[in-house]
Image (spheres, rainbow, N blue to C red):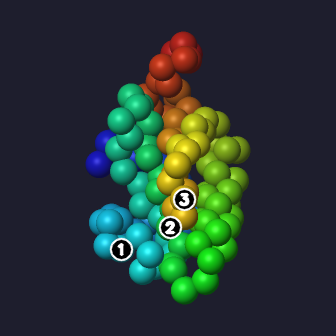
Amino acid sequence: MSEAAAWVTQQLAAAGYTALPSLRPGEYFETTGFAVEASSAPGAARVTVTARFTGQDKYEQWGEAQALASKLMDVLEPLGVGFEEIDGREPNCAFDAYPPVSAGPVRPDEEPT
């Protein structure tokens, strides 16, 4: 796990959100939750949120994933985390989270303080 992923996981855990250990393709629709992994973007953590498929319209599932992703962002934003949403993941939701400079890596578009 990257430094950014470990930091994001720790912050979410402190707020009462427990990350799934991983989300293999077969697990995406079996549970509602999220996983935090290293992102392909330098200094970022990839957060992937999934909602359990209940046999209903996939857009309802997408809504559940978006709602959980928003809650996770609400926890991280006051800590100075920047975000980049990853499109095309429906009915899952994914975003890259960039911890603040003082917490770890520097975003590509930021200067160190």
Which residue is farthest front? 57
- Tell me whether circle 1 and circle 3 mark residues in contact (CB < 8 Å): no
**Towards the viewer: 103 or 95:** 95
Q: Which mark is residue 27?
A: 1
Going 32% across and 66% down the picture, which residue do you hit? 25
94 vs 100: above or below: below
Image location (x, y in percent) of residue 17: 54, 68
Q: Is residue 68 above or below residue 45?
A: below
* Residue contact at pointers 2 and 1, CB within 8 angstroms: yes
- Would you call the spot at circle 2 few (<14 residues within 10 Å), some (14-19), or many (20 or more)? many
Other residues around mark 3 within 10 Å, as few (<14) / some (14–19) / many (≥20): some
Q: Could you classify mark 1 by the number of other residues whose Cα lies within 10 Å: few (under 14), some (14-19), or many (20 or more)?
A: few
Q: Which residue is disc 2 drawn over?
A: 50
The tag earlier along the polypeptide, 2 or 1, is 1
Q: Amino acid at mark 2?
A: Thr
* Amino acid tagged 1: Glu
Q: Determine the CA span between mark 2 and mark 1.
A: 9 Å
Report the number of discs: 3
Q: Secondary structure at mark 3?
A: loop
Q: Quadrant of residue 63?
A: bottom right
Q: Secondary structure at mark 2?
A: strand
Identify the residue under disc 3. Answer: 90
Identified at 50% across, 67% down, the residue is 50
Tag 3 or tag 1, which sits nearer the N-term? 1
- First of labels 2, 3 by sequence position: 2
Question: Which of these two is toward me, 84 or 60?
Answer: 60
